[in-house]
Structure formats: C-alpha cells, structure tokens
Amino acid sequence: MKIAHIITRLIIGGAQENTVHTVEDHVREFGDEVTLITGPALGPEGSLIPRAEQSGCNLIILDELRRNIHPLRELAAYRKLKKHLRQLQPDIVHTHSSKAGILGRRAAFALKIPCVHTIHGAAFHYGQHPVLYHAYKWSEKRAARWTAHTISVADAMSQQYLAAGIGKPENYTTIHSGFVVDPFLAASENRNAQRTAWGLLPEHILIGKIGRLFPLKGHEAVLAVAAEVVRQCPQARFLFIGDGILREQYKTEIEKMGLKEHFIFTGLVPPTEIPELMQTLDILVHTSQWEGLARVLPQALIAAKPVISFDIDGAKEVVINNETGFLVPRSDLKGLTESMTRLINDQKLRERFGKTGQEKFTDTFRHHTMSRKIRTVYQQVLDSQTDD
C-alpha cells in the first residue's frame, strides 16, 4: 500500500510512539510505501524524529504544523498538506492527534483520498477551557464527515465521541496502542544496583509515576497524598519519571512538605530506558486527569507490576479493580491514599495483581498485533471504496 501518516509533532509520547511503530511495521513487514508528515518536535519532551528517519519511511517536516493554535499558520499548514498529498497520491491517509487530525482529514477529503483517523485521546476533554472544548467538539463533528473510519485506542474513546454525536458505531474500531513488550517481560539485572544508586534500602517500596511534568498529568494528586502515605508507611518512596515545565514547582512543594528524601526525579529518559526503570518499581500510579489509554498501564502490568489509576477514559479496560490493581474515582485523594497504603503493606497482593496483569495483556499489546489490525482497517476501507 501507499500510505501517508500525518501527526502534529513527534515528541516522545504514547501517540507518537504508536505512530512510529505503525510506520516501521508497515514498511518492514509489508513492504508498504509510507510517508510520515509531521511538524517540528518542539518542547522539552524529547524527539522521535531520529527514529522516524531510520524507519524506512519518507519523512516530511512542516514547520507550519505546530501544536499551538495560530489561524494564519493553520492555513499555511493546510495548503502544504494538500500540496504534498496531491504529489504523493497515497492510497490512504492516516491522521493522528487533534490539529493534524482536522487539517489532514480536510486535506485528504478535498483530494478525494480515503482517510482513517486514530483517537489517541479525546480532542475535547476534562479540564479543557470551555471555548476550546466546544471548538474541538464542533471541529470533530465536522471532521467526521471527512473520515472513512476511526480507530480508537480504547473503547472509552469511541463511546465519548458517539455520545457527542460524532459518527456511528460501525465507523469505529478499537485497536489498543502496541509497543515492544519483550523488554518489559525481562527481569532487570540492574534493579538493585539502580535502587541503591538512588539511596534506596531493600525495605523501601517505590511508587512510580511516568509522564510529562505538565498540567493535567496528575502529579499534583501524588503530591497531595504523599505526606499522609509517608505518615502511615515511612518506607514509601516516590519516583517521577519524565520532565517538563512543572519540575521546579514540584521540587519546591516537596521541600516545603519536608519530603525531599522521599522523592526521586529522573528527568527526561528515552523510551528504551522505560522497561528497566519499570523494573525498579514496586507499584505504578497513574493519576492523569484525562488520557485515552495510557501506555504505562499495560507496560507496568506486562512487567508484573500492580497499578493504581484514576478511573478515566480507557483505564478500566486494563486496570481491573481488585484483579490487576485498584481503580480510583478521579481526584479521590482518600481512595488514592488507601490504595497506596494497602499495596505498600501487602507484598502478596502486589505480586498477585502483577502476575494477573502480565498473563492478561502481554499478547494484546504487542505492536505487531496493533500494526496488523490497523492494516486490516486500511484494506476494509479501500475495499469499500472499490465497492462504491
């Protein structure tokens, strides 16, 4: 097939890694001719552009395609997208993320090229400014007319869009966001050495939070309960994996609480180091305010780590309460505290949750499974176009 992917930016993140895996697999396993169009990877989160350059795809970087809204720049990006798609003449276009999803779908529609769109996280969501919320909701309704089929990374995403009157049930397919699972299955030889380097003792229970240090990612919830968790469980330690604009603010808050010795910050780490860091944890906590289906949840379970997550979006599709971890109502700080202290104090429960999660989700989240299912959707779309 001749495929063109469009995504706003290739920072280090779940949607971006999903996209690059799909590109790599379709080039290497199916011999597809794949073009990946993206904006510059601006921001402190790191870049996947070097990896994309090694994928075998045709990589096009549009300076005008950026995350922040700027009407004149959007118009320029749209015109350039149309120009490139007209030259490429792909069999199918696959868009990702909110802005690239809207501009890319419109450009493909204008050129009569069938387009598939992936919802990695709802464009309109909890915590968003009301003006932006309604603007994105309206835009997604419009863009649905230009979409041949929609892929969701979780059933919850499809349900949210359908509840908003966007598309019909038969227009949606859930394909979980895959990744390389084998490194998460492997026991780390460096677990104890790394924990010792951080100053941890064998009795310490390490609770990890993986994600950008940005608003809505939920680190505030961990900080809000940390003092009480430490009061009940002095052996508790917290690890923030990732970097972002709120790092210094969080460090200041931790010092004011007198919990500096209980927190570790890794800073920005490449995705390849996440499996080994995951093995250093005893518990993974996920307190984002919104997210399609955070990859760290299945990653932790495949690494046989128990998880605690706010009950947001697709989390409940892998965090099965009292089976693979604890599912806590969003912003329920009492429930979060109780879940942490219970797991900290119960090693057998931690082991049982982790083992169950590993058995349930290892095969489901292999990136080869994802890429194969995505290509099946492409074929179905192209077959339906031929039938029409």
Image: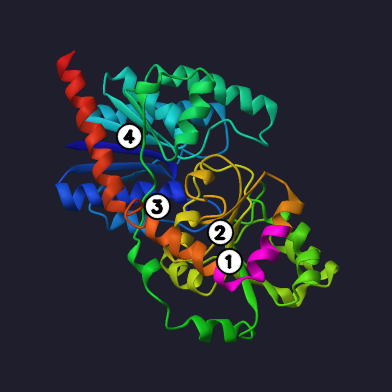
N-term mark: 3 or 1: 3
- Residue 351 spot, x, y in % from top left: 51, 69
Tag 3 residue: 17
- Left or right of residue 157: residue 196: right
Tag 2 residue: 307
Label 2 to label 1: alpha-carbon separation: 6 Å
> Magenta segment, which residues?
338-348
Q: Can residue 374 be seen in this view?
A: yes
Would residue 374 be counted in the magenta stretch?
no
Label 1 to label 4: alpha-carbon separation: 36 Å
- Left or right of residue 2: residue 6: right
Question: For the residues carrying marks 1 and 4, which lies nearer the camera in this image?
Answer: 1
Graded by Cα atoms within 10 Å as few (under 14), some (14 to 19) or many (20 or more), the crowding at tag 3 reads many
Graded by Cα atoms within 10 Å as few (under 14), some (14 to 19) or many (20 or more), the crowding at tag 1 reads many
N-term mark: 2 or 1: 1
Q: What residue appears at the point 49 percent right and 45 percent down from the top-left corner?
A: 293
Residue situated in front as seen by the camera: 64 or 301:
301
N-term mark: 1 or 4: 4
Q: Main secondary structure of the magenta part?
A: helix
Label 3 to label 1: alpha-carbon separation: 24 Å
- Left or right of residue 313: residue 154: left
Contact (CB < 8 A) between labels 2 and 1? yes
Label 3 to label 2: alpha-carbon separation: 22 Å
Tag 1 residue: 283
Residue type highlighted by circle 1: Ile
Tag 4 residue: 94
221 is higher (above) or lower (below) than 66: below
Locate the C terminus by quadrant: top left
- Residue 380 spot, x, y in % from top left: 21, 28
Residue type highlighted by circle 3: Glu
- Residue 54 spot, x, y in % from top left: 27, 58
370 is higher (above) or lower (below) than 207: above
